[in-house]
Amino acid sequence: MYKINFEYADETYEYTCQSEEDVLSAARKNFIPLPTGCRRGGCGMCKVKVVEGKFEHDPLYSKDALTDEEVKEKYALACKVYPSSNIKMVINSSKKEEKKVTPKTNMTNALKDSKWNGGIYERPVLTQKIAARMLDSACQKAKELGILINVAIVDDGANLKSFTRMDESPLLSGTIAQNKAYTAASFGVPTHDWYPMIKDEPSLLHGIVHTDRLVVFGGGIPIKLNGFIIGGIGVSGGTADQDINCASAGLKVFESIIKEERS
């Protein structure tokens, strides 16, 4: 088992890895850009040292900014050893017995961690199971408010992931709900933030509102995880404030699932 401490700009990030492959994955996942103007391998900011264990680097690939003494001590440069990673880190290995952890819920794999994999960046993914629970929560809030709504959830590409229409809810609200979710996922801001942003800019106020599928009133909220926009939820059928409340109820379920997964 490997314990990894990533150190950068006085911040330390701790991870536990089961294998050398996981170490590489963690290094790539926690990509931090090199300082502006730094030539790859030239600044030494991303120095790596194996303190303990068998995970070693070939110093021939990592000389550049390192001193001869550092090379002897098995230091390396992350930007050379891990081309996708530019970080300073220390890797510690321990021989602790691996323990199997029983998932607390059946949604442990519902969200993928973001990581580099063969040069392709993998983002967190919103699953249909979580989306369905979000829809249910939004509809439950609508019942409490005494309104009938349509709820739409889109993925990180703003493609429709899940949708529901309460019985007897306004037909046109189905399209509006989908457009709210689309707008939220496309720009990463709630739809109710749009009007305050454009109301004092005539060219935007009278121009951008004609953009296809853009909604500038409440009811659409982006879904975010680990700094990524992974989708959006849109609600239509009530007043703007009521739609916001219902969408927020759906988002609250998402946040509680994430909290449960990480506990």
Image (cartoon, grey):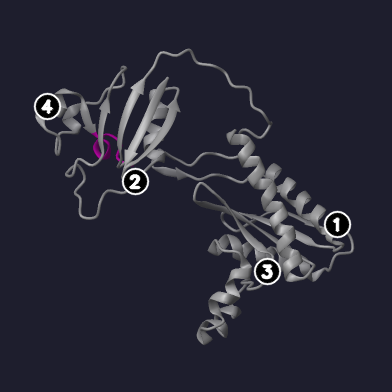
Q: Are marks 4 and 3 in contact (CB under 8 Å)?
A: no
Mark 3–mark 1 distance (CA, rounded to whole Å): 19 Å
**Pointer 2 local density, CA inside 10 Å: few below 14, some 14–19, many at least 20:** some
- Residue 152 in which image quadrant: bottom right
Residue at image x 61%, y 35%?
261
Magenta segment range? 77-84
Q: Which residue is under mark 4?
A: 69
Answer above or below: position of 161 versus 67. Answer: below
Nearest to the observer: residue 2 or residue 156: 2
Q: Which residue is under mark 2?
A: 32
| Kind of residue at disc 2 | Ile
Mark 2–mark 3 distance (CA, rounded to whole Å): 35 Å
- Residue 208 in which image quadrant: bottom right
Q: Which mark is residue 188?
A: none
Q: Tell me which label, 4 or 3, sits earlier in the chain.
A: 4
Mark 1–mark 2 distance (CA, rounded to whole Å): 46 Å
Q: Are marks 2 and 4 in contact (CB under 8 Å)?
A: no
Q: Which residue is under mark 3?
A: 218
Residue at image x 15%, y 27%?
71
Helix, strand, or loop for circle 1?
helix
| Kind of residue at disc 4 | Glu
**Pointer 3 local density, CA inside 10 Å: few below 14, some 14–19, many at least 20:** many
Residue at image x 59%, y 40%?
111
Mark 1–mark 4 distance (CA, rounded to whole Å): 69 Å
208 relative position to 51: left or right: right
Q: Which residue is under mark 1?
A: 143
Helix, strand, or loop for circle 4?
helix
